[in-house]
Image: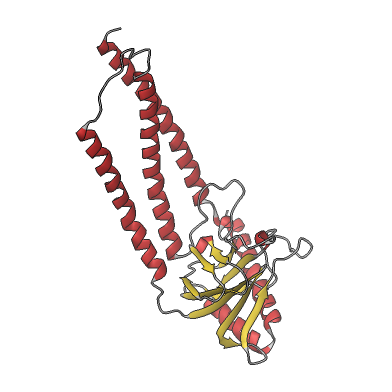
């Protein structure tokens, strides 16, 4: 086999390899995209075997999803190229094909290329990354402020601008429900006894701290994640654009029950939120929360029936 035939054979191997790798990564991307798209039932919580991100329900989460998809393409192209190049080099420059090894020590153009191209790729990644980071950290004027405190192993919440039946700021502890306390449809290890209630399409600022050790307050569908640090106040914001129930968890190792301090946020209409505030002031927090949860469940059941009738 002369050198020309060897080169043609090498090109054929490369084409087959790149085709296989491209098909594999395309399948992975397609599966990830399908999991990311999901259906309406997946809003606000993960699904078994889910590969992609949870459905976005805020501007920040939508930006994260777009950035994630951009990175997936960049990472896939780089991975396919590097894997194909490694296999080709192992085949083309093996001892059998090169009994007398090359004594090449450097290649100026190649060295410039593998320096400049990665820099350009990083710039392409950095621009949307910084834009997204600025969006998350530049907190706009909020319609609602909630103070969140991480404890071992539950969350405490306070609405400093609103009063309860006793005339104090609305405040409560949010503790994970046991298996015996779960109601039909509530997810295990994620449902809590007293959820956070917020209005839809309103900017909510969350002030986060901790009473003991490090925690992290996280709601994936909102693109919200921030550390809870003892003695320090951190801030984050979200604007939920869909009504529903959204779950999150502590995302900082904090001890033996780290896995058992979930977060539950219920996004309701502005009218229902105002009604919840009023009932909290007159009838008490437990009764008001029970009523708003019951109404959400009734609305969800009615919407499900309406969808079935349309089908």
- Residue 171, percent from left and from top: 63, 81
Seen in the picture, residue 64 relative to 159 is either above or below; the reply is above
Residue 63 position in % (x across, y down): 40, 59
Seen in the picture, residue 158 relative to 249 is either above or below; the reply is: below
Q: Residue at x 31, y 17 (%)?
A: 101
**Residue farthest top in this picture:** 1
Q: Residue at x 70, y 79 (%)?
A: 286
The image position of residue 281, as x and y in percent, is: 64, 88
Residue 127 sits in which quadrant? bottom left
Choose top left, top right, bottom left or bottom right for residue 167: bottom right
Position of 285 compared to 13: left or right?
Answer: right
Is residue 267 or residue 203 the one in the foreground?
Answer: 203
* Side (left or right) of 68 relative to 297: left
Q: Residue at x 36, y 66 (%)?
A: 134
- The figure's colour scheme reads secondary structure
Relative depth, front residue between 181 and 125: 125
- Which residue is found at the position 59% from the left and 45% from the top? 49
């Amino acid at each position: 086999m002369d050198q020309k035939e060897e080169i043609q054979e090498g090109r054929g191997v490369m084409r087959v390899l790149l085709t296989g790798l491209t098909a594999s990564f395309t399948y992975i991307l397609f599966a990830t995209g399908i999991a990311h798209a999901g259906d309406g039932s997946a809003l606000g919580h993960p699904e078994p075997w889910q590969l992609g991100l949870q459905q976005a329900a805020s501007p920040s989460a939508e930006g994260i999803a777009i950035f994630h998809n951009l990175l997936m393409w960049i990472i896939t192209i780089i991975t396919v190229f590097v894997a194909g190049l490694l296999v080709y080099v192992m085949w083309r420059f093996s001892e059998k094909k090169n009994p007398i090894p090359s004594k090449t020590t450097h290649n100026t153009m190649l060295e410039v290329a593998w320096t400049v191209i990665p820099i350009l790729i990083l710039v392409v990644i950095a621009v949307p990354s910084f834009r997204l980071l600025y969006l998350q950290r530049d907190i706009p004027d909020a319609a609602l402020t909630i103070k969140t405190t991480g404890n071992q192993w539950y969350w405490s919440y306070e609405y400093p601008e609103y009063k309860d039946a006793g005339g104090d700021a609305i405040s409560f502890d949010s503790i994970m429900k046991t298996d015996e306390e779960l109601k039909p449809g509530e997810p295990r290890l994620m449902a809590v006894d007293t959820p956070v209630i917020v209005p839809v399409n309103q900017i909510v600022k969350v002030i986060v701290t901790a009473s003991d050790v490090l925690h992290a307050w996280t709601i994936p569908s909102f693109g919200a994640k921030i550390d809870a640090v003892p003695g320090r106040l951190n801030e984050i914001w979200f604007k939920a654009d869909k009504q529903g129930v959204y779950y999150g968890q502590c995302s900082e190792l904090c001890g033996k029950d780290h896995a058992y301090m979930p977060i539950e946020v219920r996004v309701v209409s502005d009218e229902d939120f105002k009604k919840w505030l009023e009932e909290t002031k007159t009838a008490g927090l437990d009764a008001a929360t029970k009523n708003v949860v019951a109404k959400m469940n009734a609305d969800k059941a009615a919407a499900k029936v309406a969808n079935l009738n349309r089908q």
